[in-house]
Image: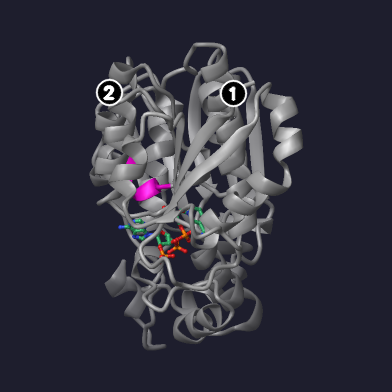
Amino acid sequence: MTALKVALLGCGNVGSEVYRLLGEQAGDLEARIGAPVEVAGVAVRRPGRTRGVAVPAGLLTTDAVGLVSRPDIDIVAEVIGGIEPARSLLLTALKAGKSVVTANKALLAEDGPVLHDAARAGGADLYYEASVAGAIPLLRPLRESLAGDAVRQVLGIVNGTTNYILDQMDTSGAGFADALEEAQALGYAEPDPTADVEGFDAAAKAAILAGLAFHTRVAAADVHREGITGVTQADIASARQLGHVVKLLAICERSDKGVSVRVHPAMIPRTHPLAGVREAYNAVFVEAESAGRLMFYGAGAGGVPTASAVLGDVVAVARNRLAGTRGPDATTYADLPALPMGQALTRYHVALDVADKPGVLARIA
Ligand SMILES: NC(=O)c1ccc[n+]([C@@H]2O[C@H](COP(=O)([O-])OP(=O)(O)OC[C@H]3O[C@@H](n4cnc5c(N)ncnc54)[C@H](OP(=O)(O)O)[C@@H]3O)[C@@H](O)[C@H]2O)c1
């Protein structure tokens, strides 16, 4: 049987594991798909760089455009990240009818509609399970398993770095700066942690989750975003006194008026299932009308766990290709407006540091 040819774009943390697993599991993958899958080329920026995996020199190329344009390529797996050149490469692939698998949350949140339109026009698949919560199967359950239900709320810890920092602040009493330094030393946080600690990464994931959950187009710009840099040890202690824990939550809610999508630090009761999500783990809590409450938990990042999600998508799109079909689209028929933060119904905890004098509380009241 003719092999399905994969162009792998990027061979870093995730890409090198995708390459390794595609080789190591070739026999099983062939049996599951019904045809062999073969890596036909690997696009990188610095071909001479030492990688976690030995890629034959003949497969490595810096010409990603040339690779995705090759007529023999069936599937493009993109793990470069960022907006460009990923966007142009994926549009080229989709327009040419090649199936795309990507882990790129930033691109999906910024330009998802354009990519989806290109996939539809090209009759190709666009799968992106790895873009939200790494290894955790979440997007397919929302897109397929819950397609017969009405999702009301999605509540998630979708950024492992900030969860690690807040968990350290809660358990060891560390301040934000010390906890961030420790996360960086352990490799949980990037040298420039802005995307994580300011909530940009979680906001991109919230946009993707809300779009799928509520069948509507949600862009990163529709998401109210507040990071964790303002969370102090006093906030953590005050939450603890009330039996709560502080988590950076991605909150997606649907009401009669529209969808509210936001990312901000929130106090949640220690009895809530998300309160027990420790260290760099991710978890997403979904509430649907008929299914009730569901919880998805696991490794939200890391080369190997993320590669698992990429490979799952490669198998899915390969099966579709062999069957001469494409998978279910993300539907946007509901077309709900994104509500501003001012219309979100929520509660605030206000802590005041005051002089212990008669009359102070009366004045504040
Ligand atoms: N790491 C995770 O835990 C994780 C989890 C979930 C999702 N993701 C997503 O997965 C994607 C990849 O992440 P990563 O951590 O694997 O990134 P990474 O380690 O920085 O790897 C990026 C790869 O892309 C290559 N590259 C960069 N610019 C390129 C260009 N212009 N043309 C061709 N290749 C280029 C790099 O080549 P060189 O090797 O030659 O520099 C490198 O191999 C991102 O979208 C990220 O958001 C990552």
Q: At label 1, which amino acid type do we have? A: Thr
* Disc marking residue 117: 2
> On screen, 183 above or below 99?
below
Locate residue 314, reporting x and y percent.
56, 34
Magenta-highlighted stretch: main secondary structure? helix
Q: Residues within 10 Å of mark 1 (few under 14, many from 20)?
A: few
Residue in the foreground of this view, choosing between 9 and 290: 9
Q: Is residue 171 left or right of residue 47?
A: right
Locate residue 307, reporting x and y percent.
59, 49
Residue in the foreground of this view, choosing between 301 and 171: 301
Q: Residues within 10 Å of mark 2 (few under 14, many from 20)?
A: some
Q: Residue at x 41, y 79 (%)?
A: 191
Locate residue 313, reporting x and y percent.
56, 34
Q: Is residue 208 left or right of residue 217?
A: right
Q: What SS does tag 1 mark?
A: loop
Q: Residue at x 64, y 53 (%)?
A: 20
